[in-house]
Amino acid sequence: MIFANPTYLYLLLLLVPIIGWYIWKIRHADASFQISSNQGFDAVPISYKVYLRHLPFVLRMLAVAVLILVLARPQSTDNWENSSTEGIDIVLAMDISSSMLAEDLKPNRLEASKDVAASFINGRPTDNIGLVVFSGESFTQCPLTTDHTVLLNLFKDIQSGMIEDGTAIGLGLANSVSRIKDSQAKSKVIILLTDGSNNMGEIAPVTAAEIAKTFGIRVYTIGVGTEGEAPYPFKTAFGVQYQNIPVQIDEETLRKIATTTGGQYFRATNTKSLGGIYAEIDEMEKTKISVQEFSKKQEEYKYFALLAFLILLFEIILRNTLLRNIP
């Protein structure tokens, strides 16, 4: 048991002078009269009320003490536990350029990629996983974390058009490397998913791959899109119109990134094959990471407040019935 406001416990010291004042008062408050002898009272039985006459005061002091405990806000103690678990550190680098809205994967490339990646995250509960998104620019949507509930909530917020359009593969990869390079895990992995070729950014994809290799990071690259052409929605004055556009994935660069870092390149032409790719990656080596688990604090003051109320109620009933004083 701990207290959120332990300084209020010092108020318990006020009970000492109050008790002292009560003792002084009862010693000087009794009336006295002189008689020749009290022998005639010896046969009179002593009422139980004589023994209980101080009970209302004791109950009131007890109620005050419990109310002070309520002010101090008692809480159940935190249960901290350090444990080791198997896992690796993974950064998902996802292309969110406008071309990811093509509907050769259902409902489109971006949503299909999000759904499959979410299933992958749910299947690896002990891993540190982060999320980087890129198009013409790149930013970190979620740093490495084992709190996958937060990660998945941030995953849902990803939309095409969040940042400048384009495909800066090198910038997205470099940003991912910066997020994982200081990890202490034995296995550090980046899963880079894109449906195009690098056309923006100051960092070349191969240069970013060389940086990843320096830090012992393996990069698995995934090219998303069917062979040939894919239906793409265009907004017009007459509503959404579909037009087939050519699928242009720089597979040579993606293979070189994977080869340079000791990873693999995959091509996903439909949602099922994309799921299979993540399943293959799921078989990678694992390493131990330290996890600190804890349980939330539980407020316990309501039980003390109820106890204080019952004590006060009992004291009031006694003072006005069985132990009532006649002035």
Image: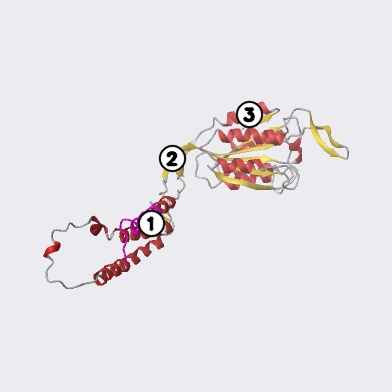
**Residue 128 part of the magenta-drawn span:** no
- The residues bearing labels 3 and 2 have C-alpha atoms spaced at a distance of 29 Å
Tell me which amino acid carries mark 3: Gly
Residue found at x 51% / y 33%: 285
Image quadrant holding the C terminus, namely bottom left
Residue 145 lies, in percent from the top left, at 54, 44
Q: Secondary structure at mark 2?
A: strand
Residue placed under numbered mark 3 in the picture: 275
Please give the range of residues in magenta. Answer: 307-327
- Res 114 → quadrant: top right
Q: Tell me which label, 3 or 2, sits earlier in the chain.
A: 2
Residue placed under numbered mark 2 in the picture: 84
Q: Secondary structure at mark 3?
A: helix
Q: Tell me which label, 3 or 1, sits earlier in the chain.
A: 3
Residue placed under numbered mark 1 in the picture: 312
Residue found at x 41% / y 44%: 81
Q: Name the side, left or right, on which 216 lies relative to 225.
A: left
